[in-house]
Amino acid sequence: MVAPPPDGIYVPVPTFFSKPVPEGIPALDLATQAKHALHLASNGIRGLVLLGSTGEAIAVANSERKTLLAHIRQEMDKAGRKDYPIIAGTATQGIEDTITQLQISKDAGAQWGLVLAPGFFATCLTQEGLKNWYLAIANRSPLPILMFAR
């Protein structure tokens, strides 16, 4: 059995974006993201839930996901918080995409994955369907997963 995250308060952290560039597409604001994460860690928050439940994760490309998670892990490590818990959310409706995001999250330094229940597949919306969904992911996930339902 895999250990759950350590006891304590975990918060969903918003993803910070810069002002849109001329093309109209905002970029991740990694400096603000790290400053906020370190502020939370220094003020009693036990762990961070990044790209989890604040809604913007569906708009973040996998390359941005890796960049954001790796940057926060690196900044935590530099601040002497090498084992500080990071939970990375997934925001997909497919098993393969979820596994991909979990692998990216692990490679970037997250220790757990937060897996969103599917919302658009009728066969998954029964108790048996949800059980099968989470088992299919858990059996292939490179990270321990936490279940998340809206």
Image (cartoon, grey):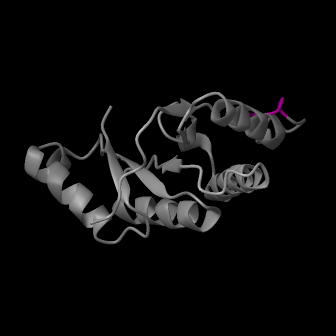
User: Image check: 145 left or right of 50?
Assistant: left
x%, y% of residue 64?
Answer: 69, 53
Tell me if I can see residue 26 in this picture. Answer: no
x%, y% of residue 147?
Answer: 31, 46
User: Observer-nearest residue: 53 or 11?
Assistant: 11
Q: Identify the magenta region.
A: 15-20
User: Observer-nearest residue: 143 or 118?
Assistant: 143
x%, y% of residue 63?
Answer: 68, 59
Question: Looking at the rendering, which quadrant does residue 62 occupy?
Answer: bottom right
Type of secondary structure dominating the magenta stretch: loop
Residue drawn 82% across the image and 33% down it: 18
User: Image check: 80 left or right of 18?
Assistant: left
Tell me if I can see residue 78 in this picture. Answer: yes
Residue drawn 78% across the image and 35% down it: 35
x%, y% of residue 44?
Answer: 58, 29
Q: Is residue 8 above or below residue 5?
A: above
Residue drawn 51% across the image and 67% down it: 103
Question: Looking at the rendering, which quadrant does residue 106 occupy?
Answer: bottom right
Magenta stretch contains residue 146: no
Quadrant placement of the N terminus: bottom left
The count of marks equals 0
Magenta stretch contains residue 16: yes
User: Image check: 106 left or right of 24?
Assistant: left
User: Image check: 48 left or right of 133?
Assistant: right
Residue drawn 38% across the image and 61% down it: 144
Quadrant placement of the C terminus: top left
